[in-house]
Amino acid sequence: MGRLARTEGLTDIQREIVETVRSFVDKEILPVATELEHKDEYPTEIVEGLKELGIFGLMIPEEYGGLGESLLTYALCVEEIARGWMSVSGIINTHFIVAYMLKQHGTREQKDHFLPRMAAGDVRGAFSMSEPALGSDVSAISSKGVREGEEFVLTGQKMWLTNGGSSSLVAVLCRTDEGHPEGTAPHKSMTTFLVEKEPGFGEVQPGLTIPGKIDKMGYKGVDTTELIMDGLRVPADRVLGGRTGRGFYQMMDGVEVGRVNVAARGCGVAQRAFELGVSYAQQRHTFGKPIAQHQAIQFKLAEMGTKVEAAHALMVGAARKKDSGQRNDLEAGMAKYLASEYCKEVVEDAFRIHGGYGFSKEYEIERLYREAPMLLIGEGTAEIQRMIIGRRLLEEYRVQS
């Protein structure tokens, strides 16, 4: 491991976990990632290996069979996994967000029912906010949940569901008008439903259809899908937390830690791009010497290394603030924004260092070049992050009249 992106102040246990994951990435993910990605093949053996390591239960409390680790430990593991193949970190992230939402907001029965099996990786989570017509405007969702006795009937179409096919538990955000008079703010009439389903595609249960995988430019291997609900019946005790109208806050809490995760992914991909760039620059010769000895390339490497270090530091700070119990939406937004932008820039510089070979599917940088753009839009676009950051800064630095 090089000098960049090291984290000071870790406990022995944290260091051991992160080193174990890095070793797994080097041995089990990097050698096969590009081949699997080009085939758009789900990484079944890799996922089974991560289950054995306990990664699916990393932040789930020990009383439910998890490791009870911090957000920082989790983020550092995600950074290592994304360094190997970003799609694998996506498989973990959506599961982690649902487990986190259950831990923070679930009823005792919901926690007892789901968390032990989620810690073991036997129940795999996905969450669903976005819809085809709304983009980042979550308050405009049109999917509805209508109460009928001891059940809710869900209708609507969801989009960009990571793990849509492979998951067996989906946290779905719908609009519910129960107990909310007309004129209630949109975000106060939303509810998160815990929908259990069979893995697979097609009509996986009455009223619930997963049409198939969306074909994407990058972020392959992981299944990204739509989710169509047409009279899907969900028991009333599967409302997250047992109360309607709390869904927006629950989802935003999950997305807040998810943004730290996306920042960690950006850090991991940028690290790998730097490793590839600095290695190739020392092997490729032009005009009688390695291109690393040309000042133009050294300038690129200097900028790349600085960006890797800066993004990592901001990500670690955001995770530590959340772990301390403080609000971290500003820090998470900054970390996600900077890490995703810097990731794109570091990957592009590594691509340029490779010259024509960077355009070849034989070289790993070609895969990273297609993966990096997803981080600019996942868990809220860069533009949304800047809005959040700007508003929070104005709150913090309000001029007193």
Image: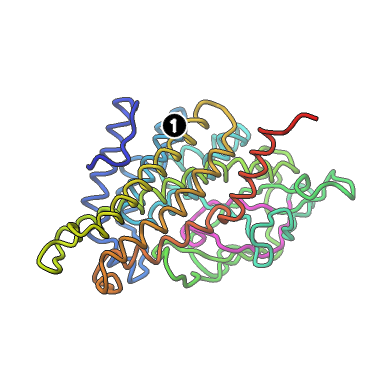
Q: Looking at the figure, which quarter contains the C terminus?
A: top right
Q: Relative to 265, does residue 12 appear above or below in the rendering? A: above
Residue 11 part of the magenta segment: no
Across and down, in percent, residue 37 comes to: 34, 66
Across and down, in percent, residue 227 comes to: 60, 64
Across and down, in percent, residue 170 comes to: 57, 52
Across and down, in percent, residue 92 comes to: 43, 49
Q: Quadrant of residue 251?
A: top right
Category of crowding for the residue at label 1, using alpha-carbon neighbours closer than 10 angstroms: few (below 14), some (14–19), many (at least 20): some
State which region is magenta. Answer: 152-173
Residue 171 part of the magenta segment: yes
Residue where numbered disc 1 is placed: 70
Count the marks: how many? 1
The dominant secondary structure in magenta is: strand
Between 287 and 200, the residue placed more toward the observer is 287
Q: Looking at the figure, which quarter contains the N terminus?
A: top left
**Local secondary structure at mark 1:** loop
- Three-letter residue code for mark 1: Ser
Q: Could you tell me which residue is drawn at 59 percent across and 38 percent down? A: 110
Q: Could you tell me which residue is drawn at 55 percent across and 56 percent down? A: 197
Identity of the residue furthest to the front in this view: 295
Identity of the residue furthest to the right in this view: 182
